[in-house]
Image (cartoon, rainbow, N blue to C red):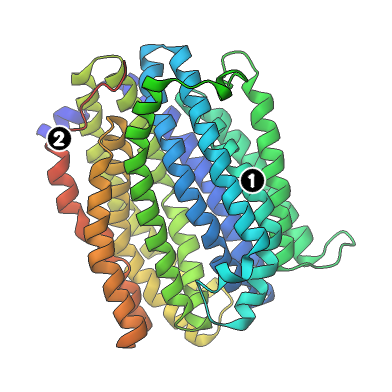
Amino acid sequence: MKIRHILQGDRPYYRKLAKLALPIAFQNLMLACVAAADAFMLGSIEQNAMSAVSLASQIQFVQNMILMAAVSATSVLGAQYWGKKDRKAIDDIFCQGMRLCALTSTVFFVGCVFFPRYLMLLFTNEEVLISIGVQYLRIAGWSYLFTGFSQCYLAMMKVSEHAAVTAKLSFATVMLNIVLNAVLIYGLCGIAPLGARGAALATLIARIAELTACIAISFRKGFLHPSLRGLFRHNALLSRDFYRCMLPLLGSSLLWGIGFTSYTAFMGHMGTEAAAASSVATVIRDLICCMCNGLANGGGILVGNALGSGDLAKGKLYGQRLAILAFVCGFASCLVMFILTPAVVHFVKLTPEAHRYLLQMMIIMSVYMIGRAVNTIVINGIFAAGGDTIFDLYSLVITMWMIAIPLAAIGTFWRHWPVYIVYACTCLDEVGKIPWVMAHYKKYKWVRDLTR
């Protein structure tokens, strides 16, 4: 009865949630489609090319974890100040995020373009995969210069109620990327086939186009763009709030990102078949996670708007609704994964052994999706909206770094467990974390107004 009372009525809330969450989910889907296109197009040519690019892409995954901290802090504070209608503060927050993204993008660009072999050695000892990955990173590394800036612009568009525009922009960028993938990977239109290098070049061109479009759109009426003077101005109070919000997010993002990267490395050290199956499972996981990411971002913005306007009761109610929807999304994601498993296993071109690994991984992933959806929406949506960002940090230390990673490492390098058992170990953290997350949620430490 209590759940029904929380969910019923308030149609404007659900309209706003759909207006924010659906475009953001669609944007995430489009981004995941690029990874899917890379995997399936390269996989149709050669299994090793698909595996190598999947491993090399983990470098960008780690970069995105760092960028996510800066962009999330920008979104959290931006949503609250948007609720308060303080444009000056929003500009300072925007500029702060841009400066951090510029620094991060430069570091990863240098690493990928000048030291790609050392980075690939972190993920695999198979020389054939290292060689292909190096070719990919030397080109794709240039695209990493632009990603952070684009993400800042897109985040501020969502905060300022232009989520639909971000979805359209992502759709156009993804379509461009996929078309270029086909042309450059397969060698269409009279161009010589480039394989993995073609996938990297397609990504670079798409990222340049995306940033150019973001800058142009930001100057439209009603949109936000960082002031040139603001990029060199330091607001001490807001910077303190920004780093207080961002540093726990950065810590948890790095722990989560490096942890997930280590999972990929475990699969890479278990052979090319395990790496190939894991690559496909990762793509499917990312596609299905789009809805929970959309709910986390869209619902979190609404919670933040309410808290920033000073209406803490409404912010708490919005958070309660989002928590219930998190479980609905989790069980729906589990069901979708089960339904898709036969089709994915049948469609992907892999060796018989890799096919067997993939089937096992997809079944395990189905259960994992419940935890992934619930934790993503509650932690990244509800907790983050009220600045309660430290919980994720210590929950990751315990569930991922003290349980999941040690078990997977023991199974990979010492006990030599079967691939499916090691893979199951890498999924323990999300499922086991649910009771702890919900216990912290009920303390309502996230019901806070962060604005000054």
- Report helix, strand or loop for mark 2: helix
Q: Is residue 116 above or below residue 408?
A: above
> Which residue is rendered at x = 64% and y = 45% of the image?
145
Q: Is residue 197 above or below residue 272?
A: above
Left or right of residue 184: residue 336: left
Residue 4 on image: x %, y %? 16, 32
Whether residue 194 is visible here, answered yes or no, is yes
Q: Quadrant of residue 226?
A: top right
Q: Which mark, residue 66?
A: none
Q: Is residue 146 above or below residue 289?
A: above
Q: Earlier in the sequence, mark 2 or mark 1?
A: 2
> Which residue is rendered at x = 64% and y = 42% of the image?
146
Whether residue 327 is visible here, answered yes or no, is no
Left or right of residue 43: residue 94: left
Q: How many marks?
A: 2
Give the labeled residue for mark 2: 3
Left or right of residue 153: residue 408: left
Q: Nearer the viewer, residue 358 or 244?
A: 244
> Which residue is rendered at x = 11% and y = 36% of the image?
443
Q: Tell me the quadrant of the picture where the N terminus can be found.
A: top left
Three-letter code for the amino acid on which mark 1 is drawn: Leu
- Report helix, strand or loop for mark 1: helix
Residue 263 on image: x %, y %? 40, 69
Residue 269 on image: x %, y %? 46, 80
Q: Residue furthest left?
A: 1
Give the labeled residue for mark 1: 145
Residue 376 on image: x %, y %? 32, 47
Q: Nearer the viewer, residue 130 or 187?
A: 130
Q: Given this view, does label 2 or label 1 mark the residue nearer the observer?
A: 1
Q: Nearer the viewer, residue 226 or 9?
A: 226
